[in-house]
Each structure stands twice: as structure tokens, then as C-alpha cells.
Image (spheres, rainbow, N blue to C red):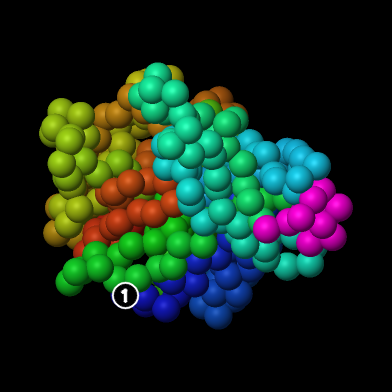
Amino acid sequence: MDYDLMARLSEADGVSSQEGEVASILENEFKKRGLKTEVDNFGNVLAYKSVGKNPLILGAHMDEIGLMVKHIDEKGFLRFIKIGGIDDRTLVNQQVVIRTQKGLLKGVIGMKPPHIMKEEERKCVVGHTSMFIDIGAENEKDALAMGVEIGSAVSFPTLFFRMGKKLMCGKALDNRIGCYIILELARNLPDNVILMGTSQEEVSVFGKGAMTASYRLEPRAFIAVDTSVAGDHPELKPDDAPLALGKGPCIALVEAGARGNVADRKLAQGIFQFAKKAKVPIQIEVFDGGATDASSVYNLRGGIPSIAVGVATRYIHSSVGVAHEEDVESTIKLLRVAIGSL
């Protein structure tokens, strides 16, 4: 596994709608692999050897959860909104980076200290609306001079590192793992297959970028390459989250409790057969929570057969994730067989 590339992808900033840094990595790496590339009006990055009518598309979203500045008070503290589904409990006292026209600006999320909270307050989860970002500004004018603006994107400066023997840890593994996988699939890509880094998946019930691109391209099938919630740690039971690290790719039969994509049965059965052919163990999931880009594509143009193939990842939708390198490699192996057969 190319850990240098994985680290660059993980550490790149790409809060939804501002995926440019990640898009540049994908575009450059696709070109190195000899593919034609384009960036569409919505910011999706497309790569292909040659493309005709009704291509097969594999999409991996580039964006990550984050924050956005909504107000600068007279003392120079920043109020913010959440971009994507973030649990407020993961935000307290986090270090952050604000992207400004003058460069990156460091800060920290603050809140009312527990020492002066009332007893009933200490029992409650502090909501993000009661938090603020401290950038060390003396006042509002100073904060503006630093380059902060309403709408400035805020991300987490988590560094990527290897953990244990075969685990990796970093920011935005959801879904830079998917981005890494489609870059690996770019080697010896068949004709009429499009690899796509999609934009704004985290800020809608169903992803925006995949929807706009798939409507235009009208693919014969769509595979979302993403991450899945791993439950192989304390406080979770197998019936809560049955997926585990090191057990192979995760095939999603149902997303968002059937409000999202219910995987096309023929496509799902094909993926199962491809897994046998590739001698890759798989995990099957039916989940009630989130959804992938497959849920934004399946009902377009009279119906596009769609399915999500993911890598089990711990602690997603926070400032850190943990995944297993063998799951990444086996997902690549499975999808190589899939795109060669479909």
C-alpha cells in the first residue's frame, strides 16, 4: 500500500463544496496513470481511458465533514455551523484550521468551562451553538485582518499515521480511502469505465455531485466506493454494527433504512460472484443510518442499478478514523474483477 499517497489524501483539506485540494491530487494522479481527466461544473473529477454511451461509474466522494464560520463577534471569537453530520460531543476543545485568503489559520474550539457550570448543565451534552473558535484575535477587526471571513471553511489538522501492525489512523478516512481505491483502480482501466471523485456527499441526505454527474452521463451501473461503520470495539454489540476491521469489503444491501438505496439484486449477486472469483471475503450490511452516493443515483433516468462497496472504519464522522490496510487492498482486488466483468 502506498502510505505516502494515503497520507496526502487524508491530510488534504476538503470540507464540502471546497474540495479543490483533494481534486487536484486526484487529477494529477489520474494523469500520471495515463487517463484522460476532466472537472465538471459541480467540481467532480472524472477520469477514463475512453468513454462511450452508458459507462460504468465508480464514485468516491472527496469531501469531508467540517465547520464553517457564520459570525465574528466584537471580541474576535468565531461562531460556526456544522458541515455534514458531526456529533457535537466530538468538537469540544478540538484544534482546528481555518482556510482563509491569506492561508491557513490555527484555532481551538472553546466553550464554557465545567468549573462554572451549574450541576444540571454538567449533565448535558454541550451543543455546537454554545461553542466558539478562538483564533487569538484581539477583536473583530483583528480577526478580519487575519483573513477570516463569513463562510471560511474550518477543518481538523489531524495527522495521518500507521497504528499497530496493519492499521492506519487519520482525518477524513471517510472518504479518502475511497479516493485512494479509485486511484489504484486507474491502473489498466478498461474502456467505458469512469472513475469519479464526487463533491458534496456529506451535506445532503444523498450526495449532490454524484447525482449531477450521473444524470448527465446516464451510466449503466454505479458503484459507490466509500467507508462503513465498524463496530468491533467496546460499547457496541454485533447487532448494532456487525462490521469489523480486517474482515474484507462491506457490501451495502440497504442504506438509510431503505429510505436510500436498496441495492440492485442482479448487481449485488454479481458482486458476490466477483468476490468468490477474486477469493476475497466480504461483509454484508443492512443499515438504518447514513447513505452513500449510491442513494443519490439509483432513481435517476428511470433507474440506475447502484450499490455501495465500503471499507469498515472506526470513529467516522469525527476528526479521526481507523481502518485496516488489508481491507483496502481486498476492496481494490474485488473491484478490479468487478469492472473487468461488468
Q: Label 1 amino acid?
A: Met
Q: Residue at x 63, y 51 (%)?
A: 134
Task: Give the quarter of the image for residue 300.
Answer: top right
Q: Residue at x 15, y 28 (%)?
A: 239
Task: Specify whether 278 is left or right of 254.
Answer: left
Crowdedness near tag 1: few (<14), some (14–19) or many (≥20) residues, C-alpha within 10 Å = few
The foreground one among 289 and 131 is 131
The foreground one among 27 and 341 is 27
Q: Relative to 34, say whether 262 is above or below.
A: above
Q: Residue at x 44, y 51 (%)?
A: 319
User: Can residue 198 be seen here?
Assistant: no
Q: Relative to 320, say whether 8 is above or below.
A: below
The percent coordinates of residue 77 (x first, y second) are 70, 46
Q: Is residue 143 magenta?
A: yes
User: Which residue is under mark 1?
Assistant: 1
- Secondary structure of the residue carrying tag 1 is loop
The percent coordinates of residue 276 (x first, y second) are 15, 52
User: Can residue 93 be seen here?
Assistant: yes
Q: Is residue 93 magenta?
A: no
Task: Specify whether 244 is left or right of 156.
Answer: left
* Magenta region, residue range: 136-149
Task: Specify whether 35 is left or right of 226.
Answer: right
